[in-house]
Image (cartoon, rainbow, N blue to C red):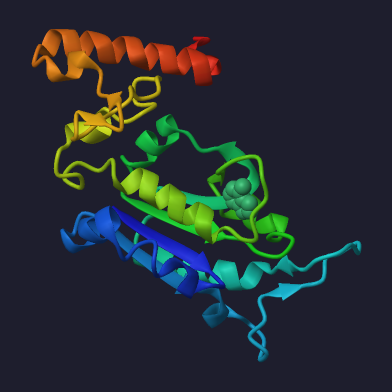
Amino acid sequence: MRFDIITVLPSLLESPFAHSILQRAQKKGIAEIHVHNLREYAVNKHKSVDDYPYGGGSGMVMQIEPFAQCIEKLQSERTYDEIIYMTPDGVTLNQEMANDLSTKENIIILCGHYKGIDQRIRDVFVTREISIGDYVLSGGELPAAIVVDAVVRLIPGVLSDETSALSDSFQDGLLDAPIYTRPAEWRGHRVPDVLLSGNEAKINEWRDEEQLKRTKDRRPDLLKD
Ligand code: ADE
């Protein structure tokens, strides 16, 4: 699977993809992540990629042409399944969406800045608009990194124990049960006896109950369906 991320701040995206699972996925050749500097596609001599909004108002707007140039260059090299724009007015990212995106081959992600991007980029090129939550960040880079992380870890072969992505919170519509490791007792706080019992059926039953309890308590909205 391949991601092409278009941004004015490529260095902001160096670290998130250079460690742990995302680094391993790239080393294994399962995921390719390419970051493109939008300024290289600027059409004026000052290399600016933004301009004043028509109709007035505060803030600058990212221009169409640099995005169009970069997107069309990429499209001339391969076919893309999705062109995603990260924006707080998009559809909120959830596990189902991440699962769906993990089945795609090639995805472009556009990162906005300033006031946002010219609406015509959204009308002409964008196939999906994704938000990571109801709050506004300074740009789309961190949201883009979150989408890539949520998606890449789901591709078969990325996690060493494939079942661990399947047992994540949300995969079955529920939050995870509490987890523990050694020591069995720490400052008087004991791990629940059932987890030390070695009885797999009882452990699974306990985990199911705890998942349901935690979900009811913290995210009752998940149980509505
Ligand atoms: N850009 C700025 N804020 C954002 C958000 N909450 N989600 C996605 N992209 C954004």
Residue 180 position in % (x across, y down): 25, 30
Residue 54 position in % (x across, y down): 86, 64
Q: Is residue 218 left or right of residue 206?
A: right
What's the residue at 49%, 69% (across, down)?
12
Q: Which residue sits furthest right?
A: 56
* Near-viewer residue (60 or 74): 60
Q: Quadrant of residue 22?
A: bottom left
* Near-viewer residue (89 or 212): 212
Residue 79 position in % (x across, y down): 37, 56
* Near-viewer residue (212 or 3): 212
Q: Quadrant of residue 36?
A: bottom left
Residue 80 vertical placement versus 160 (above, below) = below
Q: Which residue sits furthest bottom?
A: 45
Q: Is residue 108 left or right of residue 158?
A: right
What's the residue at 65%, 40% (across, down)?
134
Q: Which residue sits furthest front?
A: 187
What's the residue at 56%, 52% (across, down)?
85
Residue 138 vertical placement versus 154 (above, below) = below
What's the residue at 38%, 35% (across, down)?
100
* Near-viewer residue (124 or 223): 223
Residue 45 position in % (x across, y down): 66, 91
Please tell me how many numbered marks the rendered image carries. 0
